[in-house]
Amino acid sequence: MITQEHAAAHVHRDDVGARMGMWLFLFTELLLFGGMFFLYSVYRFINQEQFNIAAKELNTLVGTFNTIILLTSSLTMALAIGAIQRNNKSLSVFFQTLTILLAFGFLINKYFEWSIKFHHGIFPGSEILLNKPKGEILFFGLYYVMTGLHGLHVVIGIFLIGFMTRLTMKNVINKDSYVKLESAGLYWHLVDIIWIFLFPLFYLIT
């Protein structure tokens, strides 16, 4: 017969394993983007002037606005976890939903930003871009790959948090069992941190 102490210990081990698994996954994500940041640094060192010229093509105001959106979404995600820890399910669902809406706001801004670049003929393989110096081609190549990959992570985050919201509404996630929500929060914070590095690299370099 399993005692309550053994059952609690079993749940604890599961929680620890889940947290360790998420941290391991986040570490692989850091390796992926870390490699890209290293590649960016090498190319920028070789083509500093052309990278600076290309960066002027980007809209700093849009980048700043998106940064504010993601930082706010990190706050709302943290508030969602705090609310469920205090056994306030409705408030947690509200903040999770708000996080999802902010993520959609980020993607909408990014869509319009990319659309403007495409309208101006600045996209991979375009004749206008191919006629630019090599350094500018490299800049925009890295810009589309890195921000595109980041955008994909935002989309995954939306589905992940949406699933967590559903579990919260069904009381699967509650004040006694919220590791899944914590893990989703860690993932979302990583997405935000990656953007904090992408923003100055592409929008603020001089």
Image (cartoon, rainbow, N blue to C red):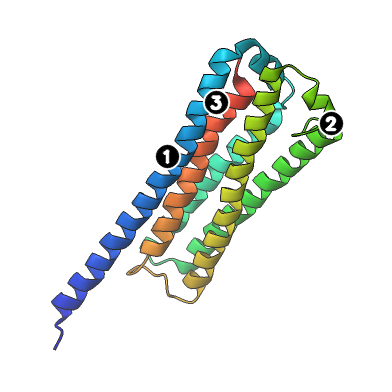
Numbered marks: total: 3
In the rendered structure, are the residues bearing label 2 and label 3 in contact, judged by CB atoms less than 8 Å apart? no
Identify the mark nearer the N-term, 1 or 3.
1
Kindly tell me whether residue 15 is visible in this rendering: yes
Horizontal side, residue 191 vs residue 152: left or right: left
Q: Residue tagged by mark 3?
A: 40
Nearer the observer, 57 or 45? 45
State whether residue 164 is above or below residue 78. Answer: below
Q: Amino acid at mark 2?
A: Gly
Local crowd at mark 3 within 10 Å, few (<14), some, or many (≥20)? some
Q: Are marks 1 and 3 in contact (CB under 8 Å)?
A: no
Q: Which mark is residue 121?
A: 2
Secondary-structure class at tag 3: helix
Residue highlighted by disc 1: 31
**Residue at horizontal 64%, vertical 17%?**
51
In primary-sequence order, the first of circles 2 and 3 is 3
Query: Marks 1/3: CA distance?
Result: 14 Å
Using the numbered discs, state the Cα–Cα distance from disc 2 to disc 1 in whole angstroms: 32 Å
Which quarter of the image is occupied by the C terminus? top right
Mark 2–mark 3 Cα distance, whole angstroms, equals 23 Å
For the N terminus, give its image quadrant.
bottom left
Whichever of labels 2 and 1 marks the residue nearer the N terminus, that label is: 1
